[in-house]
Amino acid sequence: MQDKPVALVTGANQGIGFQVAKDLVTDGFTVLVGSRNRERGEAAVKEIGLDARALQLDVTDQASIAAAAERIRTEFGHLDVLVNNAAISHTSKLAGMSVMEYAKLTRPSVVSLDEVRAVWETNVFGVLAVTQAMLPLLREAPAARIVNVSSGVGSLTRNADPAFPYRSIFGPVYPASKTALNAMTLAMAIELEPAGIKVNAVSPGFTKTNLNNYEGTDTLQEGAREVVRVALLGPDGPTGTFTHATLGTLPW
Ligand code: NAP
């Protein structure tokens, strides 16, 4: 057991999650760097240094989730911050495409149901599974926070507006998985508010990562900023919000 707050970031071996883990270490946390691949997790932890520890965690594998929760219980007894960051935009079948090519192949009229199921398995059901497993540990913390890393492309309100620039790529695979994640966020926030556990969704913005073939325009530091801010909310901070670093509150 130790005095430092403890954070778990899923999918933290690369991209925005890696940067969030790095920033939370700088902010005084012991950070569990979730990685489905053990070696990639170890490599990330070497780079972050200080108080980062690799934790094998595949959010689609119940045994891996249970083992991760058990290890956190044994080593720390509680969890202060859970960042549900891990996500995929497509399976390997649709790898290497531009955002526009991908949008065309994943329209509701033609999309493969297997593709929808695989992406939702990680981005939606994975989040619910990890959150359920970590909740007993979060309840042991004095003021726990859950941050769900969502996306502005999942906003129903924005996509209903013909002027929204990303409207043409709204589809049932990745964008709608983030809509469903937003719904999960609100449901969790409502249930956990009496327990003092804050649950918020964040849009990192269009960030240069593997998820979008590095077509994003923002840096990892910019992408991680709002996630970290919301992870560090004080006791008077809000719950059940959906925000972006520069745009502020986003419509659901
Ligand atoms: P990324 O660089 O591709 O990172 C995604 C991370 O999730 C990787 O570490 C990946 O592990 C991990 N992951 C995937 N499936 C997993 C599983 N089953 N179990 C555990 N980990 C898994 O993408 P990113 O852009 O940083 O994405 C981070 C978050 O930001 C995601 O929630 C994404 O939807 C959101 N987001 C990103 C953007 C953007 O423009 N980049 C915009 C809006 C929202 P591997 O290394 O093993 O593949």
Image (tube, rainbow, N blue to C red):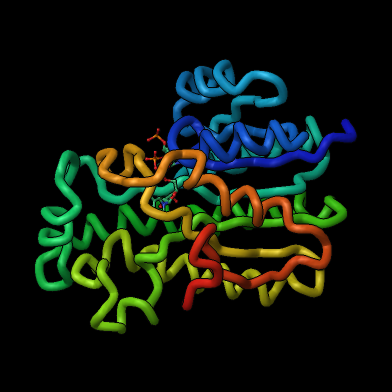
Q: Is residue 6 left or right of residue 82?
A: right
Q: Is residue 229 above or below residue 179?
A: above
Quadrant of residue 33 within the rendered picture: top right
If the image is split into quadrants, where does the N terminus sit?
top right
- Nearer to the camera, 21 or 225: 225
Question: Residue at horizontal 55%, vertical 30%?
Answer: 56
Q: Position of residue 237 (x, y in %)?
A: 75, 66
Q: Is residue 66 above or below residue 249?
A: above
Quarter of the rendered structure image containing ligand 1: top left
Question: Residue at horizontal 42%, vertical 40%?
Answer: 219
Q: Is residue 34 left or right of residue 153?
A: right
Q: Position of residue 127 (x, y in %)?
A: 52, 55
Question: Residue at horizontal 11%, vertical 61%?
Answer: 104
Q: Residue furthest front?
A: 246
Q: Is residue 194 above or below residue 229?
A: below
Q: Position of residue 183 (x, y in %)?
A: 50, 73
Question: Residue at horizontal 11%, vertical 72%?
Answer: 109
Q: Is residue 52 left or right of residue 36?
A: right
- Nearer to the camera, 196 or 131: 196
Quadrant of residue 234 within the rendered picture: bottom right
Quadrant of residue 243 within the rendered picture: bottom right
How many marks can you see?
0
Q: Position of residue 156 (x, y in %)?
A: 37, 78
- Nearer to the camera, 215 or 31: 215
